[in-house]
Image (cartoon, rainbow, N blue to C red):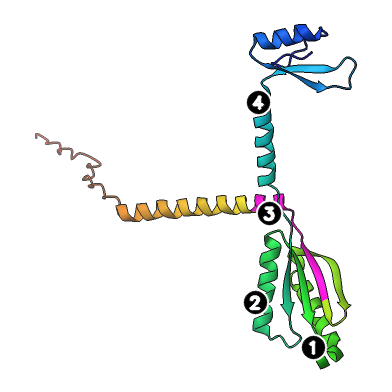
Amino acid sequence: MIGDEGEQIGVMPPFEALKLAKSKNLDLVEISPTAQPPVCRIMDYGKYLYQQEKKEREAKKHQKTITVKEVKFRINVDDHDYETKKNHVLRFLDGGDKVKATIFFRGREMTRTGLGRQILERLIKDVEPFSIVEFRPRQEGNTLHAILAPKKTAAEREKEREKEAKAKAKLEKKLAQEKDKDKAGPEPEKEKQPAAAAHEEVPAAVSHS
């Protein structure tokens, strides 16, 4: 038997345990029915269920559902289009998602699959600091694809964002202080006091002859 404060009460008959729980306007809950003898605890069962539900909601809030985002390339992609699609890949990786980079070959393009492989290998090299390769370029029918996963965990990314936010806030505060200082203008100069004479003039001695 465990009390409502977590203290060990010891073995007692069920009717006495129920009586004790009712005297405190609490419930008697069996928490380990297979133990010999079974273990019960005095608690507010409604409050307990509420706290458990709250914990589950908090846990779900911090869970990140990993999805696979697809970014499609063409074998005749120009540099500008390539950079745009590469930035999409980086954005998805930063958001914690996996990326499937795909090249679809049409008609005679099937004779140039090597060019498509070069494009995906270039992409893998360009995003290497931010990703790990789950599947290197592989061909299935008229499609060539590679799968990339984020290198950093969700916790590491969150920590990095917090660090960046703190640094940004610190910089903004510093700039605001400098701006306020500029508005106030320069401090008025103190009036200069005339320097005291270093030595007083001593009257010349008069000699009497």
Residue 149 seen in this snapshot:
yes
Report which residue position mark 4 lands on.
Answer: 46
Amino acid type, label 3: Arg
Residue range in magenta is 145-160
Q: Is residue 169 left or right of residue 53?
A: left
Mark 2 and 4 residues: CB-CB less than 8 Å, in contact? Answer: no
Determine whether 94 is above or below 192 in the image: below
Q: Earlier in the sequence, mark 3 or mark 1?
A: 1
- As helix, strand or loop, the secondary structure at mark 1 comes to loop
Report which residue position mark 1 lands on.
Answer: 106
Alpha carbon of mark 2 to alpha carbon of mark 1: how far? Answer: 22 Å
Report which residue position mark 3 lands on.
Answer: 157
Determine whether 45 is above or below 2 in the image: below
Mark 3 and 1 residues: CB-CB less than 8 Å, in contact? Answer: no
- As helix, strand or loop, the secondary structure at mark 3 comes to helix
* Residue at figure coordinates x 25%, y 47% from the top left: 190
Alpha carbon of mark 3 to alpha carbon of mark 4: how far? Answer: 37 Å
Q: Is 196 a magenta residue?
A: no
Alpha carbon of mark 3 to alpha carbon of mark 1: how far? Answer: 39 Å
* Residue at figure coordinates x 9%, y 34% from the top left: 208
> Which residue is situated farthest in the front direction here?
15
Mark 3 and 4 residues: CB-CB less than 8 Å, in contact? Answer: no
Q: Earlier in the sequence, mark 3 or mark 4?
A: 4
Any mark on residue 145, and which? none
Q: Position of residue 89 (x, y in %)?
A: 70, 69
